[in-house]
Every structure is written in C-alpha cells, then in structure tokens.
Image (tube, rainbow, N blue to C red):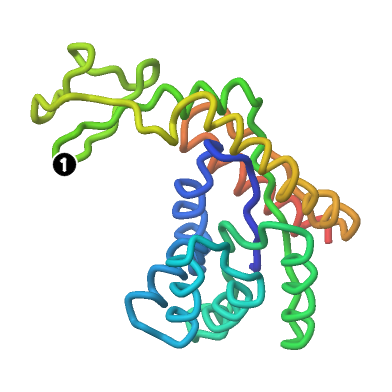
Amino acid sequence: MRIVLVGPPGAGKGTQAAFLAQNLSIPHISTGDLFRANISRQTELGKLAKSYMDAGNLVPDEVTIAMAKDRMEQPDAENGFLLDGFPRNVSQAEALDELLESESMQLDAVLDLEVPEDEVVKRIAGRRVCRNESAHVFHVTYKPPAKEGVCDVCGGELYQRDDDSEETVRKRLEVYHTQTEPIIDYYKAQGLVVTISALGKVEDVTRRAMEALKRGEDEK
C-alpha cells in the first residue's frame, strides 16, 4: 500500500506511522528522517538543504520532493510506503501525484488522524522534559512524575520546552490549518481520504487505522 499520513501536531503521527508501517510491512518515510539522512551522508540534496537551513530559510519544495523521490525509488519501497510529513501543502501534493504518475503508481489512501484542537494543546503543552542528558519525557496529565517537577528516573529537573508552550502550539496549529489541512480536501476530491479518531490508547488508534484502511481497500 502507498499511504500518506495527515494530522495536526500532537496527533501521534510519528507513533502511528511506525506501528502501521510495521503492520503493513512497508517503510515509514518521514520528512525529518529524509533531511537528517541526506545531511549526515552529505548527499548533493543534503548539502543543498543545509545551505537553506543554515541561512535560516525554508527548504524549497523541489528539494524536499527530490529527496522523497529518491527514497521512494529504493528497493524496500517497491511494494509500498507510508509518507509522514510529506506532502505538507497542496503544491507538494500535486508534485507527488505527478511523480507517482510518471512511475505508473498511485496512492491507495490518505489517512487523516483527527484530534480536537483543545486536546492537541493539552497533549503538547502538558509535556515536561528532564534537563539531564537522558531527556526523559513526562506529562502533567497522562504520565505525571511521582514528585512534581522531578524526573522519576534520574532526579533531574523537569521543564517545559519553549516550543511546547500553549502560545507556540496554537501558532503551529494555525500553520497546519493554513498550509497542510487543505491537502485533505485535495485528496477527498480523489476519494482517497480515510478519517479516524486519534483519541485513546495508541494500540486502539492503530487498530482503528488498520480496520479503516482494510475497509477502504475492500470497497475499491
């Protein structure tokens, strides 16, 4: 199967992508991993991306698309893949369609992880991270430490990262609604979108996703 995973920050895309890719025996292709791999290997695309990042600029779509194309052409992706973090906007979605068409391939589904905005804010703004090197993560509601502000593992101080503040989370959600959410309508027009609730236990969300994907395949 060839799947695109979509959802707001805090929807658990990374976690679900790993489980779904394992269950479906396809590679999980994450934009972040693509950038890190190309930069660490010092590929031409990696050097190009780093030059933009070092200058404080966004990496152009064509560079991201070229990285994704290179990864999707690897042998382990022959029978499918799960894209996480790409496409991020409609122009990238259009470019992906063109790329797949040129390779006589097409997407099977776009899995939309749905989470209420207040829950996203609660999930992210409630995170607390240990200042020590271990960087253990806790949550004020879902995984509170035994003693407030203290890491259960090493006794280090727990703090809230700047990018986890409620103000920053709401700004990230604005960017998602403006830039990424429109791809859901783009793919709905192609009959590809499968929407599931991303609330509840991780394993329950994975089960819902697998069942929804299977239903979508059966209905084709």
Q: Which residue is painted at 56% across and 85% down in the image? A: 73
Q: Secondary structure at mark 1?
A: loop
User: Residue 214 at x, y = what percent?
Assistant: 68, 53
Badge 1 crowding class, 10 Å Cα cut-off, few under 14, some 14 to 19, many 20 or more, is few
Q: Quadrant of the C terminus?
A: bottom right
User: Residue 194 at x, y = what percent?
Assistant: 74, 47
Q: How many marks?
A: 1
Q: Which residue is mark 1?
A: 134
Q: Quadrant of the N terminus?
A: bottom right
Instruction: Give, as a three-letter code, the residue at label 1.
Output: Ser
In this image, 110 relative to 160: left or right? right
**Residue farthest to the left?**
154
Q: Which residue is painted at 65% across and 49% down in the image? A: 6
In this image, 211 relative to 45: left or right? right
In this image, 20 relative to 4: left or right? left
User: Residue 28 at x, y = what percent?
Assistant: 49, 64
In this image, 72 relative to 178: left or right? left
Q: Is residue 215 above or below residue 152?
A: below
User: Residue 16 at x, y = what percent?
Assistant: 50, 47
Q: Which residue is painted at 21% across and 31% down in the image? A: 130
**Residue farthest to the top?**
147
Q: Nearer the viewer, residue 132 or 5?
A: 132
Q: Is residue 149 above or below residue 76?
A: above
Q: Which residue is painted at 52% across and 34% down in the image? A: 204
